[in-house]
Amino acid sequence: MAEFSIIETYFNRQHASNQVDLGIGDDSALISPPDQHQLVICADTLVSGRHFPTHTAAHAVGWKAVAVNLSDIAAMAAKPHSILLALSMPTVDHEWLQGFSDGLYACCDRYGVQLIGGDTTQSPHLSLTVTAMGWVETGKAVRRSGAQIGDLIVVSGSIGDAAFALQHLGHPLQQRLDYPTPRCELGQQLCGLASSMIDISDGLIQDLGHILTASQVGAKIALEQLPINTQLQGIAEHLRWQYALAGGDDYELCFTISEANYQKLLHLQPEVTTSVIGRIQEQSGLSFTLHGHNQPLQLHGYQHFA
Ligand code: ADP
Ligand code: MG
């Protein structure tokens, strides 16, 4: 099957919202950012066997390829607009392509995003690169570098689910691994409120660490406040912390915010729960407490955190 008929069959659906000037079919797409806004743009690649288990359902792969990028757009406090898809695959597997494109469009439709172009090639490995674009009012993007001493550290949803599911394929929490939910609405509500923000893809410690480094501050985390799924309550405490702090694939937002602005956020009634897990402090590094007492932690893959 020729490249153009793959595109025509699977990737040229009409979208409900048609907010692009020129979509699929020409050499490039055309989009017009609103006045006084900046283009926010990012890309993420998923390689089969590396970023998702080889037997992951095609529909889930399609969803996740879009979702992980929309999560990066959300983490800048931006509104997602459109995506490009670069698809490399060993063979033309129609069943897989149908499931994949259904999953991809399901995520696009859920978040009001349009597929406006891409590239389709043959290669020995299945690999997908999605580029996502969005808008944010000029100067209003929330970066990693703005955390202030005394700010609250807040996390959306629950963390550790996906890492647990990866070790327990077939568990109901596999839904959280296969179908991450980018926090697009929350991200936009945090525009003008959060002082810094990141999405959690590599585990809370590593990603919060990026905020601390960029902002040149430290943090104290209260372990009993970590939002850990009730389905993980039965497992040993240190394992729960391991999943929640060092797991990854959460695609939740971690942000810092003043107490006053956090109250403003709560008045907006975000559709996802948010949990205060700690505070930004002057002393550099990351330390942990359990019910008010210092709790040195040793997590697999990490050195001591004291
Ligand atoms: P060119 O040869 O000029 O790069 P292509 O033949 O690769 O153009 O692509 C034709 C059109 O189809 C372009 O508009 C391109 O953006 C789009 N396209 C190609 N592959 C995909 C894909 N996997 N998903 C969405 N659009 C695609
Ligand atoms: Mg091309």
Image: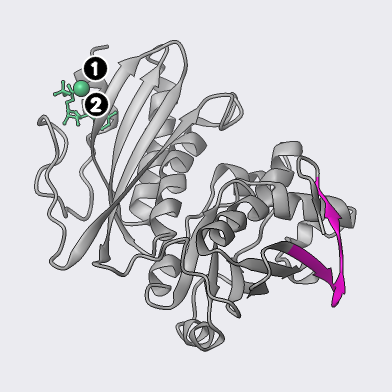
> Callout 1 environment at 10 Å: few (<14), some (14 to 19), or many (20+)?
few
Q: Is residue 243 above or below residue 136?
A: above
* SS at badge 1: helix
Q: Main secondary structure of the magenta part?
A: strand
Residue 60 image position (x, y, % from top left): 51, 38
Kindly identify the residue that appears in the image at 58 percent across and 61 percent down. 212
Q: Is mark 1 within 8 Å of ligand 1?
A: yes
Residue at the (66%, 64%) spot, across then down: 284
Can residue 297 be seen from the camera position used here? yes
Q: Is residue 123 magenta?
A: no
The three-letter code of the residue at mark 1 reads: Glu
Say which mark, if any, is on residue 7.
Answer: 2
Identify whether 132 is placed above or below 229.
above
- State whether label 2 is within 8 Å of ligand 1: yes
Residue 297 magenta-drawn? Answer: yes
Q: Residue, x 20% and y 64% (percent of image)?
A: 37
* Res 33 quadrant in image: bottom left
Q: In x, y percent, where is residue 275?
A: 64, 73
Q: Quadrant of ligand 1?
A: top left
Disc 2 is placed on an element classified as helix
Q: Which residues are magenta?
A: 287-299
